[in-house]
Image: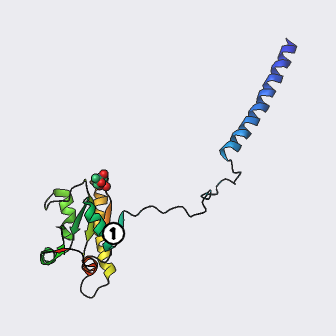
Amino acid sequence: MALSRKALVTVALAVLLLCAGCAEAGKKKANPGGRKPGRKPKPSNGNKPSKREPDVLTVTAAAALGLLNAKNTTFLDIRPEADYTASHIAGATSLPKNLVRQAINTGKPKAPPAGKNILCYSAPAAGAKPTTATDESIATCLYFKTSGKYPDIQLYALAGGFPSWKQAGYAVEP
Ligand SMILES: *[C@@H]1O[C@H](CO)[C@@H](O)[C@H](O)[C@H]1NC(C)=O
C-alpha cells in the first residue's frame, strides 16, 4: 500500500514535469521568431504594411476613360442639372449632389444600379481649386458606401472633375 502510494506520487511528479516541458514547447511554437511579445512582426519583404484602400478611389481622367470603356461603372454627374444639360461626360447620368441621399433612400429621382461601380464627378466653382471638385465628389460618393445599399461596388471620384476630362480631350455631350 505504502509502495504503491509512493509510485503514485512519482508518477504525478513525472506528469507535472512533462507538462511543464510541453507548455514551454507550446510557447516556443507560438512564437517561432523568439520575438518579445507585444512587438508587431515586421513584414518579411521589409515594406510597410499596405494601408487600407480608401472607400472612394480618386482617379485621373485617363483612368476614368478606362473605367468608362470597361462599361461597368455608372458615371454620375453631381453638378446642378443646368450644368449637366449644358455639357457632360458622354454617357454620364445626372444626379445633383443635393439629391443623392434622397435618390438612395427613396428611389426618386432614380438611384444608380447597385450592381455597377460608381464614379462621381463635379466641377470646381469659378475660381476655386480643382481639388475642391475632387473633395466634393468623394464626400458625395461616400453616401453610397454609408447607405449600406451598395455593398459590393467600388466608388471613384474624378480628380479635378469635369474640367480635367475636357482638358484631356475626351468625349462630351451634347
Ligand atoms: C461589375 O462590377 C461589380 C461591382 O464591383 C462586380 O461585382 C461585377 O463582377 C463586375 N462585372 C464585370 C462584368 O466586371
- The answer to whether residue 168 is visible is yes
* Above-or-below relation of 148 to 78: above
* Above-or-below relation of 71 to 77: above
Q: Amino acid at mark 1?
A: Ala
**Horizontal and vertical percent position of residue 54:** 40, 64
Residue depicted at 30% across the width and 66% down the height? 66
Quarter of the image for residue 172 reads: bottom left
Q: Quadrant of the C terminus?
A: bottom left
Left/right of residue 104 with respect to residue 30 in the rendered view: left
**Horizontal and vertical percent position of residue 127:** 27, 88
Please count the marks in the image.
Answer: 1
Residue depicted at 30% across the width and 69% down the height? 64
Secondary element under disc 1, as helix, strand or loop, is: helix
Residue depicted at 78% across the width and 25% down the height? 12
What scheme was used to colour the molecule?
A: rainbow
Q: Nearer the viewer, residue 2 or 16?
A: 16
Left/right of residue 82 with respect to residue 156 in the rendered view: left
Quarter of the image for residue 77 reads: bottom left
Which residue of the protein is positioned furthest toward the right in this rendering? 3
Residue depicted at 76% across the width and 36% down the height? 21
Q: Residues within 10 Å of mark 1 (few under 14, many from 20)?
A: few
Left/right of residue 61 with respect to residue 108 in the rendered view: right
Quarter of the image for residue 125 reads: bottom left
Left/right of residue 53 with respect to residue 155 in the rendered view: right
**Horizontal and vertical percent position of residue 130:** 31, 81
Q: Quadrant of the N terminus?
A: top right
Which residue of the protein is positioned furthest toward the top in this rendering? 1
Per the image, the residue denoted by label 1 is 63
**Horizontal and vertical percent position of residue 169:** 25, 79
* Above-or-below relation of 20 to 97: above
